[in-house]
Image: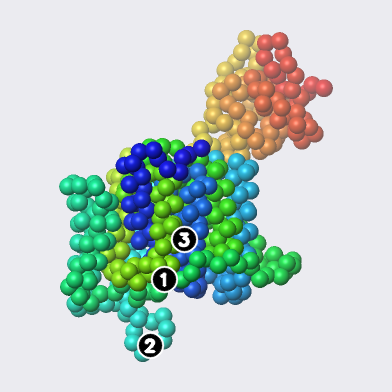
Amino acid sequence: MFSIISKRKECIKNDLLSGLTVALALVPEAVAFALLAHLHPLTGLYAAFTIGLIASIVGGRPGMISGATGAIAVVIGGLVLTHGEEYLFAAVIMMGFIQISFGVLKLGKFIRLVPHPVFLGFVNGLALVILIAQFEHFKIPVAGAAEGVHEWISGNPLYIMIALILLTMAIIHYLPRFTKAIPSTLAAIVVGTLIVLGLGLDTRTVHDMASIKGVFPPFHLPEVELSWEAFKIVFPYAIAMAAVGLIESLLTLNLVDELTETTGEPNRECVGQGVANVVTGMFSGMGGCAMVGQSIINIKSGGRQRLSGISAALFLLIFILYASSLIETIPIAVLVGVMFMVVIGTFEWGSLRLLGKIPLADWFIIVAVTAITVISDNLAIAVIIGVILSALVFAWEHAKSINATTRIDRMGNKVYEINGPLFFASTQNFQDIFSPKDDTDDVVVDFKNSRIADHSAIEAIEKLAVRYDRADKRLHLKHVSQECRLLLKKAGPLVEVNVVEDPTYHIADDKLG
């Protein structure tokens, strides 16, 4: 069990300061994601508080930040528009129970099936998504135009914004060289805000996005009729949200593991995310998952323990209840500068140098996952497609590896020594190895250097046995492993080759029995 508060005073200070920094960065993100999902800004802020607090306490990765995310906002937009907030809250609660079940069944370990090229593509794609999202802050509503119509800022407002962004990035980059007493990100936010207030600069602030003043998240059970019709509406969204949330959370967990050189608990994180979403669905929250950008800010600011995530959530609640007027004075440009530094820290620049150093297929997967993430703005879909592509590449490469060496044994029988796995993708190449018409009356297929992997492999053996039977010749299988013999036995009538034990080796003969 991880401790919530470290015994070292320095760690406590770092966790509290990094939590404050993360809370400041959470505000515009939560507001933006709520608006993207056609919800009131406070719905996003409430989710950021409840999910951030509970996931930090219950989850399996200290130092990782959770809250309302763009990946979830994209999924729920259609549900909100067609059926309203009440159905959303019901879907969020159901999503949480699905995630809890996933963790209880210990399925979080399957995140290990995500290959490294897919992980690199995920990280790079996410960095680009964060980058592209920041350019929306360079637009302002067109006066007198319909709602949603924006234009690019220009002139002095643009120059001021660029100057504040560059100043913020410079402070974050250079301050740690002089002192690490306070997180450089927090210092950049404070300095940038004071400069704007002191010089009276005309630039957009958090207040221009929306007011963040509110009350403690109200307890509210979804007002949805318990019926089969309602279930059919809610369940597909709950499944999609649960999948997106878990994939993004577990990949973020892996990223934080790499940054901190520690190991989190994927199954516990699944449960933590589930509990957090069940609670936020009951307290007027939009649902969410782990946040890569804010997690990196937390780690880079010195947050390592659960206290950092807990304090971030509590600071956010304080902002909502008591300090909204202060937080609303933070310039958007300063927060954009913070996120630009997150992009620089998130993107795996080394992956650009991998072309020619790794298999072309792996490099293609990195680019494909990155592109799909950016185009679809859906991390889960990108990762799933990446895993499928990796599996297909793996199957194709191993299918080509199956081959055989032939010899004549002392009994005058032709022996095929199979090399490489026999599975669904290699069955055709396996069949092409043999020439029943040209072989001896007794043929031995030696699987010492091979493995019968699946049902398709069993069917391939059956098909081969039939080919030799039609040629009036006998087929023997040698060195079939215990596991493979069990597969053949379970197949029963599907395979006409009987497996018997020989004092020296195991033989499967289609003429026996």
Q: Is residue 169 left or right of residue 374?
A: left
Give the mark, 3 or 2, whose residue is nearer the N terminus: 3
Answer above or below: position of 168 versus 154. above
Question: Which residue is drawn at the image coordinates 59% and 74% (left, top)?
Answer: 84
Rendering quarter of residue 83:
bottom right
What distance separates the C-alpha of mark 2 from that of mark 1?
Answer: 25 Å
Residue 422 is left or right of residue 134, and the answer is right
Q: Residue at x 23, y 77 (%)?
A: 202
User: Is there any visible trace of residue 190 in the rendered image?
Assistant: yes
Q: Amino acid at mark 3?
A: Ala
Mark carried by residue 145: 2
Q: Which residue is mark 3?
A: 48
- For the residues carrying marks 2 and 1, which lies nearer the camera in this image? 1
- Amino acid type, mark 2: Ala
Query: What x and y, as percent, mark residue 58?
Result: 53, 47
Please state the total of marks drawn on the protein image.
3
**For mark 1, does the 10 Å Cα neighbourhood hold few (<14), some (14 to 19), or many (20 or more) residues?**
many
Q: 134 or 471, which is in the foreground?
A: 134
Could you say which disc has been placed on residue 380 in the image? none
Measuring from the top left, give residue 271's x and y in whole percent: 57, 47
- Residue situated in front as seen by the camera: 482 or 11: 11
- Residue at the spot 54% in from the left edge and 26% down from the top edge: 419
- Tell which tag, 3 or 2, sits nearer the viewer: 3
Q: Are marks 3 and 2 in contact (CB under 8 Å)?
A: no
